[in-house]
Amino acid sequence: MNSESALALFFEEAFEQSNLLESLLLSLDEQPESNAEDLSAMFRSAHTIKGSAGLFALDGLIAFTHVMENVLDRLRNGELAIDKPLVALLLACNDHLQQMLVHYRNAPSEPFPEDAEHRRLLAALEEHTQFEHSGASTPPAAAPESTACGTWHLFLRYHPDLFRHGFDPASFLRYLGKLGEIVHIHTRLETPDTLLELDPTTCRLSNELAFRSPATAAEIASAFEFIQDESEIDILPPASGYDVFAALAARYGGSAESHLARWQEAGYLPANTPQPTAPQVQVPTSESTAKPSAVPEKRRGADRVEGSRFIRIEAAKLDALINRVGELVISAASSRMRAKETDDSDMIQAVEVLSQLVEGIRDDALNLRMVPISEIFNRFPRMVHDVSGRLGKEIELDLVGADTEIDKSMIEKLTDPLMHIVRNAIDHGIEDAASRIAQGKPARGLLRLKAYHDTGAIVVDVSDDGRGMNKAAILAKAQERGLLPEGRQLSDQEIYKLIFLPGFSTAEQVSDISGRGVGMDVVRRNIDALRGEIEVLSKPGLGSTLRIRLPLTLAIIDGFHVEVAGSSLVLPLDMMAECMDMPTEQISRETRQIWLRDAWIPYVSLRELFALPPCDGPEYVVVAQFGQTTAGIIVDRLIGDIQAVIKPLGSLFRSLRGVSGSTIMGNGRLALILDIPQLIQLALNREHRLVEQRQAELTEHGITPTHPETRATQPLTPWRSS
């Protein structure tokens, strides 16, 4: 592996280990009686970062992580008590560790500047450890002799990649010294046949030692937990029989007699023990041996290959694959169209089979970009912990649907909006403990992030059980800023949408968390950039929910091909409910409504929207649905299903309403992809205004409106700015 790619891989894995350490520390803060597995996992995270950093001589990172590792080691050994100040210190150290990783990622050869904060954290860590910050720990005194002590025999054959993985054999022996006394040790070095085979990064060492300790087999084996899956570790209990040593000597290869003679000389075997005649007995694998002998290297390598279920792929390579698949989809559509023109049944059948395969490749390629939304959700426990602590509030974070998958390209773009929403919920939404108790609520507030799939979209809800939004305060602020026309009556959704205006804030005090009015407009812009919608639901005294609805993918969709005035348009297929002939009698041109079975629904005419001349021929209605809202879209022709590769519009057309992108048809023509949510909202807004005007006119003439076509439909739901 080339050094640059190896370094990039190190930083990726180091950040993963740091994030794991943070999540485990947060769980400790919630439940101090954490189990031993979590404590060991925390130690392993720090140890892995330190060991891997050694491969690249990142000395500052190694030194800092070493002190963290010492504290975590004392935690897992029960030498330190877990409390909130210690957890807070380790969280701060982990943050500092991530800053060091960022520094070395940008400038691997430059030392990390040890500022006052760096020195403060080191000093605080060293108060919790018996070791100095020299990088080497002082082995404790050997275990005292006792009748319970026995002499174990350990045979350590290290894996050739041990150094490359950042491990030092001496560190395991030092740790072993905590459990007892190393009576005898013999280090063997396997020399290569030629200088050409000499590689300083290859470990050719092995250790054989006698170890006197009262420890159990499992405790001794734990000293090698980081390398036991790759290296061969044989642990023979006290008073093991001659057959056990003989079998081990036979399995080691070479001359079994020389192995046995060496062990006899070291005192592992009595000098008068007879030589074996048929050393066929295997090393025992019962619990009495503590650690079964490692399987042969070839077998272990096969097991590791079979267990490798994941591989790392650069995002750029994945994007290139998606682009190629998109071009393949366009070519397949073109082939299908040309095959139909030939009227050759064999050709048509062959192309259909090809199209099905292309569709399968498309789905598989898109699935490669899908990742669990936990990549976003996992960032919030720490943020909620810190922000709620600064505000003196008790808040429980509930993450639901973290395994729901989302397009990888949306991860970073969605994180920032969610951060703003969560901060506002903690600061403005959830009350302090005293206020909640006075209202009969639990002192501990609840903040829930929930993700789920719904009608071809992914939905993310951010809910709290706080005070809810104050509509009166929102209206008052809007009137103060001159944002409300005189006499205009707003629905709840129209009131709530005011919070997304730039600089709009009802906060009485500005803090470093929120209140400046620079957050929610960013939320709206980012959601718009993802072709999404945001809806606000709130009940006074019970809490609020901000619901974000996003498309499943930003690359390729299943669409429905329609035409208007000879121009091709594509509607996302998963938002279409049905198609029907244009009803000539059950339609209200005044209020832009169509009677669909048992209800009036709004409609939008694409000819009117794009300022095209009226249609002379028949028209059709595509009934589209988005969430709980339904509307009709009037078109000239219904063509059929199509796979559309989404191409973004240029900056000149970003403000174009009702259009989310473009695609290339099989015949090479360009087609616009319609933005169904925006068209539905446009229809709802237009219908609402026309109904208000109609009712005002009738009321002005003393007429009470009763005709169903003058009734306003359901309250306006998802709002989207243009």
Image (cartoon, rainbow, N blue to C red):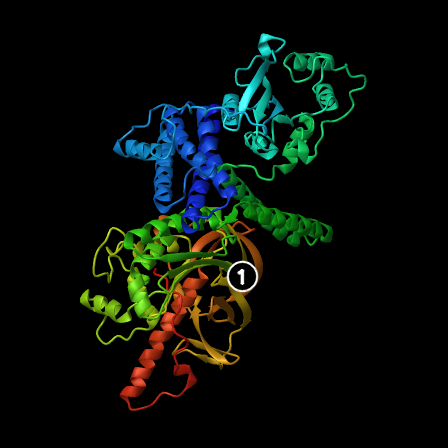
Report the front residue among 238 and 119. 238
Mark 1 burial class by Cα count in 10 Å: few <14, some 14-19, many 20+: some
Report the front residue among 456 and 377. 377
Report the front residue among 666 and 234. 234
Q: Position of residue 490 (x, y in %)?
A: 30, 73
| Residue 63, visible in the rendered structure | yes
Residue 106 found in image quarter: top left
Q: Which residue is mark 1?
A: 574
Question: Which residue occupies the extreme bottom position in the image?
Answer: 702
Report the front residue among 431 and 113. 431
Q: Position of residue 451 (x, y in %)?
A: 47, 57
Residue 105 found in image quarter: top left
Q: Is residue 252 left or right of residue 428?
A: right
Q: Amino acid at mark 1?
A: Asp
| Residue 203, visible in the rendered structure | no
Q: Position of residue 326 (x, y in %)?
A: 54, 46
Q: Position of residue 284 (x, y in %)?
A: 72, 30
Quadrant of the frame with the C terminus: bottom left
Q: Residue at x 47, y 28 (%)?
A: 52
Q: Is residue 359 above or below residue 313?
A: below
Q: Residue at x 48, y 79 (%)?
A: 599
Question: Which residue occupies the extreme front position in the image?
Answer: 147
Q: Is residue 189 above or below residue 701?
A: above
Residue 288 found in image quarter: top right
Q: Is residue 606 left or right of residue 292?
A: left
Look at the numbered disc 1 and give the secondary structure of its residue: helix
User: How many marks are shown on the rendered structure?
Assistant: 1
